Image (cartoon, rainbow, N blue to C red):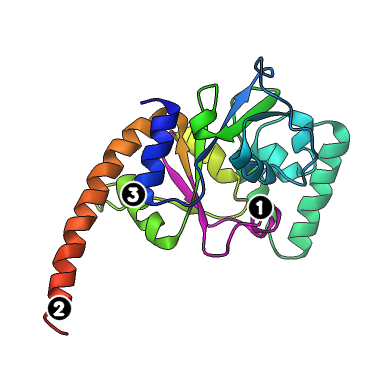
């Protein structure tokens, strides 16, 4: 399936009201792809900018969020590393984070000097990951389609802070992920309080769409059954 076809399938099957966005870490800006042209406070803020069109953001454009830059696996200059250390210490002092957690925070291993962002439908390169904003009801369907709800499978993991760690985890494991998010993500993206983040490995989107079709149809059948059961008690 093409990128537009995949985006349409995800949108229709999950009843999304925000477009699936995608990103790919690259070694150089692809020809014809514009730079962001605007500073942002965090890497996750770029996810919302990506809803509006395709652009390229070099590594330095992520440095306003040292944690996000670390998770994205960028080589950071000394001053950004120093800011990261100070930020982590502040988080620990505030009892938001434990120092023992820091070394465990996932980081993207793929090399690159920047990232191409944009709507999945328009992305001119192959995506590393596809991002979706889901309500709890949509997350239920997503979870079942991913196989994480299967009791014979390894239990699926829903991550939390930092929200961007779900991107690194999806890329590393090549498995769909979900994240409740973090206060930084909710502040910088302005996403509604009833939404959570879902992350699909780019190479598995087509496979996921096929599983999603089965899941949606199965849930429609179960809904009809349950509504019939409910009617008996009306």
Between 229 and 154, the one nearer to me in the picture? 229
Q: Give, as a single range, the part of the protein colored magenta.
A: 174-198
Of pointers 1 and 2, the one earlier in the residue sequence: 1
Of pointers 3 and 2, the one earlier in the residue sequence: 3
Between 56 and 81, the one nearer to me in the picture? 56
Give left or right: position of 10 versus 160: left
Toward which corner of the image does residue 3 lie, by quadrant? top left
- Most distant residue in the right direction: 79
Disc 1: which residue: 189
The answer to whether residue 152 is seen in the rendering is no
Q: Quadrant of the C terminus?
A: bottom left
Distance from disc 1 to disc 2, alpha carbons, whole Å, reads 42 Å
Distance from disc 3 to disc 1, alpha carbons, whole Å, reads 27 Å
Q: Tell me the tag on residue 156.
A: none
Residue at the (28%, 40%) spot, across then down: 211
Q: Quadrant of the N terminus?
A: top left
Q: Secondary structure at mark 2?
A: helix
Q: Secondary structure at mark 3?
A: loop
The picture places residue 231, in percent across and down from the top left corner, at 15, 78
The picture places residue 228, in percent across and down from the top left corner, at 13, 71
Disc 3: which residue: 148
């Amino acid at each position: 399936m093409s990128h537009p076809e995949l985006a349409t399938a995800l949108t229709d099957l999950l009843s999304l009201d925000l477009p699936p966005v995608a990103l790919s870490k690259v070694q150089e800006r692809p020809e014809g792809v514009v730079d962001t042209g605007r500073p942002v406070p965090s890497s996750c803020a770029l996810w919302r900018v990506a809803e509006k069109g395709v652009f390229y953001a070099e590594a330095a454009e992520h440095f306003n969020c040292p944690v996000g830059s670390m998770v994205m696996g960028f080589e950071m200059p000394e001053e950004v590393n120093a800011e990261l250390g100070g930020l982590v210490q502040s988080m620990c002092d505030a009892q938001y984070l434990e120092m023992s957690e820091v070394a465990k925070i996932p980081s993207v291993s793929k090399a690159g000097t920047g990232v191409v962002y944009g709507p999945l439908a328009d992305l001119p390169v192959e995506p590393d990951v596809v991002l979706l904003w889901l309500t709890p009801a949509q997350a239920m369907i997503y979870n079942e389609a991913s196989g994480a709800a299967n009791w014979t499978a390894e239990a699926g993991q829903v991550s939390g802070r930092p929200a961007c760690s779900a991107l690194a985890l999806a890329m590393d494991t090549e498995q769909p992920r979900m994240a409740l998010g973090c206060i930084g993500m909710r502040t910088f993206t302005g996403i509604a309080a009833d939404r959570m983040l879902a992350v699909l490995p780019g190479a598995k989107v087509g496979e996921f769409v096929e599983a999603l079709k089965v899941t949606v149809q199965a849930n429609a059948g179960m809904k009809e059954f349950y509504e019939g059961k409910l009617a008996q008690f009306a």
